Amino acid sequence: MAPASNPTSNDLLFRLSAMQTRRATHYTVIAQSAEEVQDIENAPSVSMGPYLISSEKAGLLRTLSVYSQRGDSREQLRLLYMNETALQVWRAMGKQPRLVGAEYRPPHTALLTFGVPFSE
C-alpha cells in the first residue's frame, strides 16, 4: 500500500492561488490595432449578432458580455474586455485576438459594447 502523501503549505497555497486566479479573471483584455479597427467586422457590436443568429446560437446573447475602451497607441487603439463566452464566440468566428491581460471586471471607463452587463 502506498503511503498517504500530506500536502505542504506551499502545495495548498498554489492550489488556492490557482482557484483564486480562475475566479478573479472574468474578462480577457484584447487589443486591436488601428488597422484592425478599420475593418468593421472586427467590431463585436456589428459582427457577433449576425454570427450568432446564422449559427443558431442566439441563446448565447444572454450570457456574453463585451466592453470596449479607447486605447493609447496605434497598436492598442481599441481594448475589448470579453467574458469567456464572448471570447469563445469571437474565436469561433475565426478571429485571432491579441490577448494583453485579464481583469475581474472592465474598468468604469469602458462601455458595454455588446451583450449583457457584468454581474456577479
Image (tube, rainbow, N blue to C red):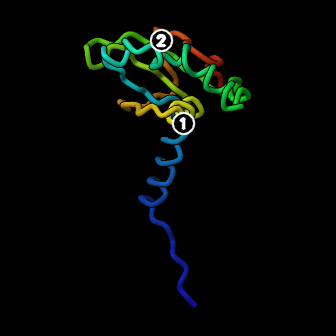
Q: Element under label 1?
A: helix
Which residue lies at the image location 51% right of the left edge and 16% below the top edge?
67
Point out which mark residue 110 bears: 2
Quadrant that contains the C terminus:
top right
Residue in the picture at 48% in, 22% down: 81
Which image quadrant is residue 71 in? top left
Q: Nearer the viewer, residue 65 or 3?
A: 65
Q: Which of marks 2 and 1 is nearer the N terminus?
A: 1
Q: What is the three-letter code of the residue carrying label 2?
A: Ala
How many residues crowd mark 2 within 10 Å: few (<14), some (14–19), many (20+)?
A: some
Amino acid type of disc 1?
Answer: Ala
Q: In which quarter of the image is residue 47?
A: top right
Residue 75 locus on image (x, y percent): 27, 19
Cα–Cα span, label 2 and label 1: 24 Å
Is 2 placed above or below 15 here?
below
The disc placed on residue 92 is 1
Q: Which residue is drawn at 41% across and 33% down?
A: 96
- Mark 2 vs mark 1, foreground winner is 1
